[in-house]
Amino acid sequence: MAPADRRILIVSAVLFAVVTTAAFFVAPARQDVSTVPTSFSSGSQGARAAFLLLEDLGHDVQRWQRPPVELPKEPAGVLLILAEPRAFTEGERRALRQFLLDGGAVLATGPEAAALVPHWPEADGEHGAERTDCNAVHPSDVTRGAPTLSIAPRATFDEGKAPQLALYECAGRPGVAAAMLGKGRFLWWSGPTPLTNAGIRQAGNLAHFLNVVGAAGSWRILWDEYFHGHEGSFGSYLRGTPIPWGAAQAMLILLAAILTHTRRAGAVVAPAPVSRHDPVEFTETVGGLYERAGARTTAILIAHHRFRSLLARRGIPLRAGAAEVERRLQSAAGRGAAGVAETLRECEGIFRGGTIEEWRALQLVQLLHEHAQRLGLIRASGA
């Protein structure tokens, strides 16, 4: 490596190290600002603490990352937690309802989840994000030891318009409600606060959440992550990482390397030799010489001499005049001899000292060639 190149490499490496070190100390700490209560998130709005708590208490809990149509076909004893799911498609809604009808239990939060129960009024969303104290209004197994909850309602509905029972009221509106659908049990929260990392510590929230999931072994708990975008396939995992872009860049680099390598390391093939006696090259060279020398008469002389030599092979002497050439050709070739005598006379006049324009010199050469073809002295072009 040349000294100049070595210096450039060293300076670039030093600059890269300095910038990387500075970015490490100066870059702000990454904060989880997601508002989705996913069990993967450790942020204040995530639900990782509740999921790990269930594991520590010995519950049979697992993340569910597959479509609703793949839920257990015999769901008795299965509790599905739907924490703020996205809007359902019609097929997903049917599959979840069938899960309830067959005996499954669902704990759902937010406005979209209310659509699982037929005739449940659409949540009106009047409440804001401020936490509200919700008071138990009906005694049940899920309100035991938790007379008050702290929830930031995202939706509510008018009580009495559907077959559900309000268990907690938040500012006079239902905040927690229960309903039966077929053999299944449906519990709805107006917001996910009782299971979020920040909300589970609030008064009554933890006790209520543990009442819902029951003692260890009471339920097989499926914590939904499918509706949070966490699909359980390897491809879906890769789509959420920089791996696809890295693979695309690697393929581009590999393609460039292959192209450059094949151009450098391919078989050595000598170029095809170009003959310096190629007819076209010779003709162009001679023509160029005549043109630069202005040798119009010489070009006509060569073409005339060639024509007379061809006639000599047919028995017409080189010293025969134009009239004799015409007479002999007429007796042998008939009408094919027309114009030969005039062309020969014009050529002979030029040889005796006449002048001629360049365009006419070209015409005479062409005429002599055409006469030779018409008389059969040479083969016609393309024959």
Image (cartoon, rainbow, N blue to C red):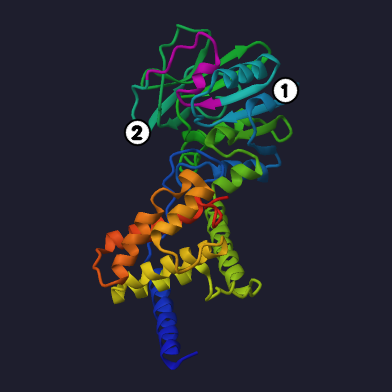
Q: Position of residue 253 (x, y in %)?
A: 55, 63
Q: Position of residue 365 (x, y in %)?
A: 38, 61
Name which residue type carries label 1: Pro
Residue 72 is left or right of residue 207, and the answer is: right
The magenta region covers 108-124
Q: Position of residue 368 (x, y in %)?
A: 42, 58
Residue 350 lies, with reference to residue 235, above or below; the image says below
- Quarter assignment of residue 211: top right
Q: Residue at x 47, y 36 (%)?
A: 203
Specify whether residue 42 is in view: no
Disc number for residue 75? 1
Q: Residue at x 34, y 57 (%)?
A: 363
Disc number for residue 130? 2
Q: Residue at x 46, y 34 (%)?
A: 193
> Does the magenta run of residues contain 120?
yes
Q: Secondary structure at mark 2?
A: loop
Name which residue type carries label 2: Glu
